[in-house]
Amino acid sequence: MTKYELVCLFKTKEDNYAKGLEAVKALLTEAGAEFLKEEDMGDRAVAYPIKKEDRAHYYFFNIKLDGSKIISLDEQFKLREEL
């Protein structure tokens, strides 16, 4: 298993953040990720607007995961509106 760093950006509305974080953790757990470190980095300005949003809530993960799961996770993350 390989170590990966993942930073998720959530829309700043509180309900989006809570739902999104729960969904990301569930997807990572389902993929067999081992959580090494998690850090709530808080609400920050983004370098440029993303979908007309100029702020996002950042959350950092340091995980161990089988590399063959990355593409599948990436596709699933793209389907989430909260991210």
Image: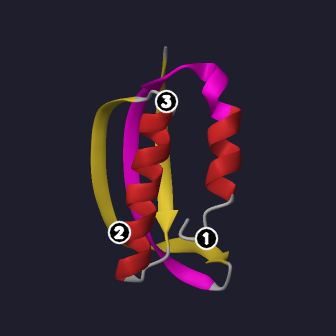
Residue 22 covered by magenta stretch? no
Q: Which residue is mark 2?
A: 18
**Image position, residue 45 (x, y; %):** 47, 76
Q: CA distance from mark 3 to mark 2?
A: 22 Å
Name the residue rendered at 35%, 80% in the picture: 14
Q: Secondary structure beneath disc 1?
A: loop
What's the residue type where badge 3 is placed? Tyr
Q: Is residue 68 above or below residue 71?
A: above
Between 46 and 40, the residue placed more toward the observer is 40
Q: Earlier in the sequence, mark 2 or mark 1?
A: 2
Residue 65 covered by magenta stretch? yes
Q: Which residue is mark 3?
A: 4
Which label belongs to residue 81? 1
Name the residue rendered at 28%, 50% in the picture: 39
Q: Earlier in the sequence, mark 1 or mark 3?
A: 3
In the image, the segment drawn in magenta is 53-70
What's the residue type where badge 1 is placed? Glu
**Image position, residue 17 (x, y; %):** 40, 71
Q: Main secondary structure of the magenta part?
A: strand
